[in-house]
Amino acid sequence: MTETKDLGAVLSDLSHRFQEAEQKYEADCDMFWKNLSEEDKLKAFFSVCKRIYKGDVEDRRSYRGVLYDVFEFGSESYTIGMQCGYMPIHNLISEGIDAKEIMKDHANSMKEDYTKSGDE
């Protein structure tokens, strides 16, 4: 029973340390942003959005594919992307494109059916 309590305490401590590290990283990133000039903020915004558009919309890459191949980050970016909310953004973009394509295919199918029924 003692081992279970010790393991629980260790896991709780690790979880707490992980949360602290995430909060520190977020604060560091916020300070980095705050210290950028407006011109550098606009360049950063442009650069990030351009890469998200290329990876998610044009190339239809996976979450990892966008991070590793488009942004050219390493595996450390996976968790950081989750922490900042990029994974849900990626999924929403993908789901939206998929839904649009399904609707387009359905409309084209209905148009073909209508055209065929008019020929009979």
Image (tube, rainbow, N blue to C red):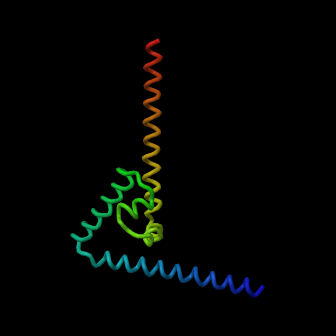
Left-right relation of 30 to 8: left
Query: Which residue extends farthest right?
Result: 1
Residue at the image position 35 percent from the left and 61 percent from the top: 70
- 98 to 21, vertically: above or below: above
Residue at the image position 47 percent from the left and 27 percent from the top: 110
The number of numbered discs placed on residues in the rendered structure image is: 0
Residue at the image position 35 percent from the left and 64 percent from the top: 71
- Residue 50: x percent and y percent? 30, 58
| Residue nearest the observer in this picture, 45 or 56 | 56
Residue 47: which quarter of the image? bottom left
Residue at the image position 44 percent from the left and 67 percent from the top: 81
- Residue 100: x percent and y percent? 43, 42
- 106 to 19, vertically: above or below: above
Query: Which residue extends farthest left?
Result: 39
Residue 63: which quarter of the image? bottom left
Left-right relation of 11 to 108: right
- Residue 31: x percent and y percent? 34, 79
* Quarter placement of the N terminus: bottom right
Residue 42: which quarter of the image? bottom left
- Residue 67: x percent and y percent? 40, 64
- 55 to 99, vertically: above or below: below
